[in-house]
Image (cartoon, rainbow, N blue to C red):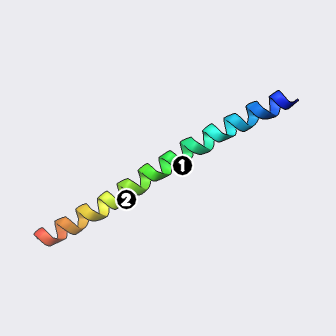
Amino acid sequence: MFRKMLVTLAIAGVALTASACNTVKGVGRDIESVGQAGSDAMHK
């Protein structure tokens, strides 16, 4: 029983870590696109 709970918690931890990583990448892309749009606006 304890081993089953430990495996479940480990899998949940890996899933949460992976989703957090994707969220950080998405925020980075959003910030980059805003910076690019601002740069494009200043050069026009």
Query: Where, quadrant-wise, is the C terminus in this rendering?
Result: bottom left
**Comparing labels 2 and 1, the label whose residue is closer to the camera:** 1
**Residue at image mark 2:** 30
Q: Is residue 16 left or right of residue 26?
A: right
Q: Is residue 22 left or right of residue 16?
A: left
* Residue in the image at 42% along x and 57% along y: 27
Q: CA distance from mark 2 to mark 1?
A: 15 Å
**Relative to 23, is 36 above or below?**
below
Query: Where, quadrant-wise, is the N terminus in this rendering?
Result: top right
**Relative to 36, is 18 above or below?**
above
Identify which amino acid the numbered label 1 is placed on: Ala
Q: Residue 6: x, y in percent?
A: 77, 33
**Relative to 6, is 41 above or below?**
below
Q: Residues within 10 Å of mark 1 (few under 14, many from 20)?
A: few
Q: Are marks 2 and 1 in contact (CB under 8 Å)?
A: no
**Relative to 32, is 2 above or below?**
above
**Dot label at residue 37:** none
Q: Residues within 10 Å of mark 2 (few under 14, many from 20)?
A: few
Nearer the observer, 18 or 41: 18
Q: Is residue 18 left or right of residue 41?
A: right
Q: Residue 10: x, y in percent?
A: 69, 35
Nearer the observer, 8 or 43: 8
Identify which amino acid the numbered label 2 is placed on: Asp
* Residue in the image at 68% along x and 34% along y: 11
**Dot label at residue 20:** 1
Nearer the observer, 2 or 18: 2
Q: Residue furthest left?
A: 44
